Image (spheres, rainbow, N blue to C red):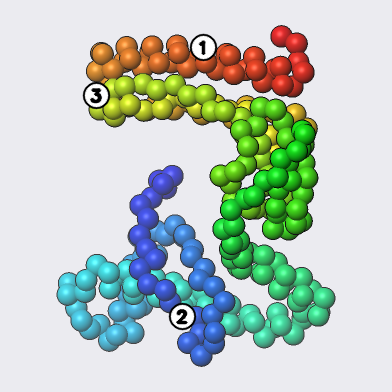
């Protein structure tokens, strides 16, 4: 079997129960063989009494017939199991199942986009958060500030240093940033960062002429020098000795 067969569909959203209010659309990606496709299409075509002839059915309608037959088989199987499963469920287990479904099939509430209003003091900054109200936290000397940020959760508070970049110029892509780095620290995240870290992105992906390749090579040397300086600054902010 091919590791990555081509993907087709879903062509339409198929209602599992037209008389019930749906909770979510579940998109499945299932690998199938030619024999399985043939069986599904033959069954769907038989339900239409063989009309119209297969040669007259459009590509999309072929896919609809196959997807519909596969989906119907799955839904019928679930419906057949539902009475037995429901009868055996304890209230406690049913509540656990509903909670798991709620986590998996409920979109997170969109947070309002409220501009941040930082209040700076000596070595600290007070920021608004959606979940903890006003929070006062240490403000590193290297942080560029929070004036252009949007209010988020406490865990989202991140300090950013000045960006360090390096560009390359090529005939195909023009001027392109090939390296970007900056000191960052998220002191209240899921894994609190007690010391600052360096966010680094290096990206070169192009077809280059000889001149372009030389320009990229020179830009990478410049990027290395600037990254070395930024790393030395990071070591200083972390209190490390080289």
The nearer-to-camera label among 2 and 1 is 1
Q: Residues within 10 Å of mark 2 (few under 14, many from 20)?
A: some
The residue that label 1 is drawn on is: 225
Give whichever of discs 2 and 3 has the lower sequence position: 2
Q: Secondary structure at mark 3?
A: loop
Which of the pair 13/75 is nearer the observer? 13
User: Where in the figure is residue 22, as x and y percent of width and height?
Assistant: 54, 80
Q: Is 45 left or right of 233, judged from the image as shown?
A: left
Seen at 37% across and 55% down, the residue is 7
Residue lying at the far bottom of the rendered structure: 19
Which residue matches tag 2? 15
Report, in whole angstroms, how far the alpha carbon at label 2 lies from the one at label 1: 59 Å
Number of numbered discs overlaid on the protein picture? 3
Whether residue 235 is visible, yes or no, is yes
Q: Is residue 12 left or right of residue 58?
A: right
Left or right: 206 as drawn, with respect to 224: left
Q: Which residue is mark 3?
A: 171
Q: Are marks 1 and 3 in contact (CB under 8 Å)?
A: no
60 to 32, vertically: above or below: below
The front one of 106 and 10 is 106
Percent x, y for residue 198? 62, 27
Q: Is 184 left or right of 20, judged from the image as shown?
A: right
Q: Give the CA separation, mark 1 to mark 3.
A: 24 Å
Q: Which mark lies nearer to you, 2 or 3?
A: 3
Which badge, 1 or 3, is on the more N-terminal residue? 3
Q: Position of residue 103 (x, y in %)?
A: 67, 65
């Amino acid at each position: 079997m091919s590791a990555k067969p081509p993907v087709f569909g879903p062509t339409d959203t198929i209602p599992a129960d037209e008389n019930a209010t749906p909770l979510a659309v579940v998109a499945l990606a299932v690998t199938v063989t030619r024999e399985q496709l043939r069986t599904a299409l033959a069954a769907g075509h038989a339900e239409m009494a063989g009309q119209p002839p297969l040669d007259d059915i459009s590509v999309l309608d072929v896919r609809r017939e196959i997807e519909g037959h596969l989906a119907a088989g799955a839904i019928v199987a679930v419906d057949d199991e539902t009475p037995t499963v429901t009868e055996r469920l304890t209230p406690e287990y049913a509540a656990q199942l509903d909670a798991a479904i709620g986590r998996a099939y409920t979109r997170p509430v969109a947070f309002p986009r409220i501009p941040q209003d930082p209040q700076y003091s000596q070595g600290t900054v007070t920021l608004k958060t959606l979940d903890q109200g006003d929070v006062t936290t240490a403000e590193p000397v290297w942080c560029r500030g929070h004036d252009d940020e949007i209010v988020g959760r406490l865990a989202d508070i991140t300090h950013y240093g000045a960006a360090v970049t390096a560009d390359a110029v090529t005939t195909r892509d023009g001027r392109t940033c090939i390296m970007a780095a900056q000191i960052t620290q998220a002191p209240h995240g899921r894994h609190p960062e007690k010391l600052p870290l360096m966010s680094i992105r290096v990206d070169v992906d192009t077809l280059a002429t000889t001149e372009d390749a030389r320009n990229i090579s020179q830009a990478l040397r410049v990027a290395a020098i600037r990254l070395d300086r930024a790393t030395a600054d990071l070591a200083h902010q972390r209190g490390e000795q080289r």
